[in-house]
Image: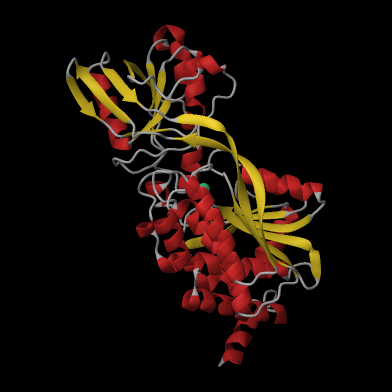
Amino acid sequence: MRKIILFTALLLNPHIYSQDTDEFSSFIKKIYNEALSNGKAYEWLDYLSNQIGGRLSGSVSYDRSVTWGKEQLSLINLDSVWLQPVMVPKWVRGAPEYAHIETRPGNNISVPIAALGGSIATPSIGISANVIEVKNFDELNQLGMENVEGKIVFFNRPMDPTIINTFQAYGGSVNQRTQGAVQAAKLGAVGVIVRSMTTNLDDYPHTGSMYYDGISLNQRIPAAAISTNGAELLSSMLKLNPNLKFFFRQNSKNFPDVLTNNVIGEVIGSEKPEEIIVVGGHLDSWDLGDGSHDDGAGIVQSMEVLRIFKDIGYKPKRTIRVVLYANEENGLRGGNKYADESKEKNENHFFALESDAGGFTPRGFSFDTSDKEFKSLKKYEDLFAEYGMNNFFKGGSGADIGPLKDGKVILAGLRPDTQRYFDYHHSAADTFDKINKRELELGAAAMASLVYLLDNYKL
Ligand SMILES: [Zn+2]
């Protein structure tokens, strides 16, 4: 029966089916079987999410996750496991934020907000000011100082719902969050409220990083995310009464950098040990939820790649490292540190793969490499067809592995379905109950399969 199938496949696809691809195909099946029958990813993530929880850089729980990651990697008998020290920013949210819309004196409607990561506090009595709503920086700059000074700028550009890939829609809106405070401060605003980065209408504020680059210390103004329902309400009330006031209070604070670690585990290659393959995600997360999708999923999937290889007895030909990166969310110091040290040591990275797009059903891989290399890698796409993720395309890879880019290393990212990611991203809704065990395991299996293929590529 098997011979007949293979023969038919040969007739249909004579250029694809070689002895190699048949061998690859059965090995990938073995990887999937292992991930779906004896997978550890879900159990690991349960612990990371429910016993450790949100892991903001510089926090005690981040350091607990480092200890846990090192312990778990040691238990799977890698050749070595170590910590890589790295200095990271420390920002603390403080007491829960509070905000309300003041329609007339004494008449307030409270709305959910969350300080943006890196934002300063408001004065302890809060800020109350008129609001100017804009969709983008052009609109803001056209209004000019005479309309903005002394006010709270309300950035209310939704993620474009017509864009199918929600990461693209996020990319089209997120500058309000990262740079909105700077743009508004330059025109004399006293605070910034940003519509949450989600296509959902709900009551969760979605936090995320913001930066004060380009303005002086005393120009800094506080910035917070407002839930999308809150944003809709504020916008409609402003239409009725452009003179309404908005009040918000937060006591978030930046502290000096602190020392923490990336966690690294490694299996030395049997044929080309000097060529390194990295698989990873980021161990830190925002503090509002437990960071199950962002990026607990990527962490446990990356760990699972080496666990699967160990347990099915696969001996890599190249050196394979799993890296649990520190501080992706508000600084990328972990990714930069890893790349810097690797450069100093003259290490030779052959391939790097990141999972940082949630633990949802995997759909494919994006590759950041030359056209020529991509064309050659694309021939592996069909091997993933029966797993529903034969979509190889050129695109980004992952923030943490980005600093390794040197024109030679092949970079790739796991691309799960994107439709639900921003329902949870950076909010209190990013919790373990949103994880589907099989989807998580399928992602780990896909990653292990791609790492296996690249381990055998260009030997
Ligand atoms: Zn992430």
Q: Residue at image x 71%, y 68%?
A: 455
Q: Is residue 21 above or below residue 299?
A: below
Q: Quadrant of the N terminus?
A: bottom right
Q: Residue furthest top?
A: 146
> In the displayed structure, would residue 30 be above or below residue 278?
below
Colour mode of the rendering: secondary structure
**Screen quadrant of the C terminus:** bottom right
Measured as percent of width and height from the top left, residue 309 is found at 63, 74
In which image quadrant can residue 349 be found? bottom right
Tell which of 343 and 354 is nearer to you.
343
Say which residue appears at 42% left-offset and 6% top-offset.
146
Give the image location of residue 234, x and y in percent.
28, 26
Q: Say which of 63 and 320 sits in front.
A: 63
Q: Is residue 13 above or below residue 7?
A: above
Q: Is residue 447 visible?
A: no
- Asked whether, in this view, residue 149 is left or right of residue 175, the answer is left
User: Farthest residue toward the bottom?
Assistant: 1
Q: Image point 65% across, 82% down: which residue? A: 10
The image position of residue 190, as x and y in percent, is 41, 16
> How many marks can you see?
0
The structure residue drawn at horizontal position 51% and vertical position 71%, both measured from the top left corner, is 387
- Is 185 left or right of 409, judged from the image as shown? left
